[in-house]
Image (tube, grey):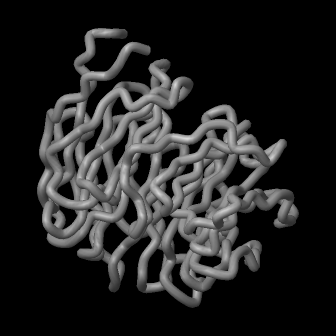
Amino acid sequence: MSGTNFKPKYILSGHSKSISSLKFSPDGSLLASSGADKLVKLWDAHTGEILRTLEGHTEGISDVAWSSDGEFLASASDDKTIKIWSMELGTEAKTLLGHTNFVFCLNYNPHSNILVSGGFDETVRVWDVARGKSLKVLPAHSDPVTSVGFSHDGTLIVSCAMDGLIRIWDADSGQCLKTLVDDDNPICSHVKFSPNSRFVLVSTQDSTIRLWNYHTSRCVKTYTGHTNRTYCIPACFSGTKHKYIVSGSEDNKIYIWDLQTRKIIQVLEGHRDVILALATHPSEDIIASASMEKDLNIRIWYNESGET
């Protein structure tokens, strides 16, 4: 891959406080955003038009996640609840109660019958979505849980926390199968399985992103050049055959690395504050990004490199 040529295409405004999370719908037609203003907003991913605002949380929202069929969106809030919203009706379908502190992160399994969440109560919770009930509470970490997710077949859960540990769990039994830890034990901000689920991509607050082979407990690649020492900043894999890694940064820029060579291939400038939210489109070379208070706009970037 010789490089990318992402250019800003749309600037979306609507949130009145810091934007915490951005997620493209599974079919790539919609973009969901959430923020400290207690709102979830839905945008047309290809025109930038605002379609809907979802109100109901009583405190700020830290994360949103789509069900795999795009029918539902889940949101995690400082009001200690998770809300599940029906996209068809545009209304709240369920509220999941159980976390005893801020809910910080969540994700559906591939069948979307199970939801995993993590929070400041230091637990990872596994939920039966249909019944709206907690199935398991994993005493996962000794600090707030910053990121949770499922493997592509739903058999494994990965979590990470401010304690610097990355844990892999058996989704059925709730047993911890593996703990990954770096020598220096930096705070872990974000973790996600690679598309084939053979690796996990981990962002840590030592300004480093690491790709771990969790079977061998070895870090196989590191990506550096960005700044991340204070905030939980996510990293994403590209959704296309162009293999790259994207991350926000505390220098208000977005960094793009070639997955294999680990070289920075593009740096995107335009935001005026720390990039806290980032998403890559599931099938096209499109990136959505958002930053903190000083800049309440969502930016949508299209790759115009001419390579297909």
Q: Is residue 56 visible?
A: yes
Residue 21 image-quadrant placement? bottom left
Image position of 195 (left or right of 300) = right
Looking at the picture, does residue 209 appear above or below residue 148?
above
- Residue 101 screen position, x and y as percent: 53, 87
The residue drawn where x is 44% and y is 29% is 263
Looking at the picture, does residue 119 appear above or below residue 89?
below
Going by the picture, which residue comes out furthest to the top?
307
Number of marks: 0
- Residue 257 screen position, x and y as percent: 43, 32
- Residue 110 screen position, x and y as percent: 64, 45
Looking at the picture, does residue 294 appear above or below residue 27?
below
Going by the picture, which residue comes out furthest to the front?
184
The residue drawn where x is 14% and y is 50% is 12
Foreground of the two, 196 or 4:
4
Image position of 255 (left or right of 80) = left
Looking at the picture, does residue 240 appear above or below residue 245?
above
Image position of 148 (left or right of 272) = right
Q: Is residue 130 visible?
A: no
The residue drawn where x is 46% and y is 36% is 245
Q: Please identify the quadrant where the N terminus is shown.
A: top left
Foreground of the two, 5 or 133:
5
Residue 294 image-quadrant placement? bottom left
The residue drawn where x is 75% and y is 72% is 135
Q: Please identify the quadrant where the C terminus is shown.
A: top left
